[in-house]
Image (tube, rainbow, N blue to C red):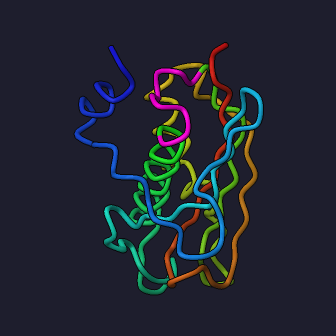
């Protein structure tokens, strides 16, 4: 079963690759590694889960925001690699969570992205990661995710 078929089995679909909102590339390949720029839950041009977790956005919606941000990361990987089936391993993830200062559930929010990658790639979807809480993100989104994947030889 292809990665996109597994995605459909979860009731999700890969969005079109996001258009950069600045002077950068959505993803770049170096050797067998693909690095994505930070992506948000803007799917097909529509911003989702806008606001600060603990104020306008619930932690549960923050989890979905991280998941949808990972979908955009995967769309960027596909743009460079041609197919998600070329992904041999998800290597690293970095997650940023826009939250009120007293919120300490950043790791659980970013699990939205980590859980999706594990469901799609199995053990090859387990990765190292860093998570940070921040007081603002571009366009006031609630989460931003970037990933590094290794492509099969």
**Quadrant location of the N terminus in the rendered image:** top left
Whether residue 16 appears in magenta in the rendering, the answer is no
Decide: is 132 above or below 140. above
- Residue 113's spot in the image, x, y percent? 52, 47
Residue 7 sits in quarter:
top left
Residue ID at (58%, 28%): 125
1 sits to left or right of 58: left
Q: Foreground residue, 100 or 138?
A: 138
Q: Foreground residue, 71 or 33?
A: 33
Whether residue 80 appears in magenta in the rendering, the answer is yes
- Residue 25's spot in the image, x, y percent? 62, 59
133 sits to left or right of 81: right
4 sits to left or right of 37: left
Residue 114 sits in quarter:
top right
Decide: is 9 above or below 42. above
Decide: is 122 above or below 34. above
| SS majority, magenta | helix
Task: Magenta stretch: give its range.
Answer: 79-87
- Residue 138's spot in the image, x, y percent? 57, 81
Disc count in the image? 0
Residue ID at (27%, 43%): 12
Residue ID at (68%, 27%): 150
Decide: is 123 above or below 104. above
- Residue 82's spot in the image, x, y percent? 47, 31
Residue ID at (67%, 13%): 153
């Amino acid at each position: 079963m292809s990665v996109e078929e597994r995605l459909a089995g979860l009731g999700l679909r890969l969005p079109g690759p996001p258009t950069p909102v600045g002077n950068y590339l959505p993803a770049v390949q170096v050797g067998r590694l693909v690095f994505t720029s930070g992506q948000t839950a803007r799917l097909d041009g529509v911003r989702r889960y806008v606001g600060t977790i603990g104020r306008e956005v619930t932690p549960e919606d923050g989890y979905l925001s991280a998941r949808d941000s990972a979908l955009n990361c995967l769309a960027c990987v596909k743009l460079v690699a041609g197919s998600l089936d070329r992904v041999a391993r998800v290597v690293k993830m970095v997650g940023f969570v826009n939250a009120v200062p007293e919120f300490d559930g950043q790791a659980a929010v970013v699990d939205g992205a980590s859980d999706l990658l594990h469901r799609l790639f199995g053990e090859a979807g387990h990765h190292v990661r860093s998570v940070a809480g921040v007081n603002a993100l571009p366009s006031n989104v609630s989460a931003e995710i970037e990933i590094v994947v290794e492509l099969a030889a």
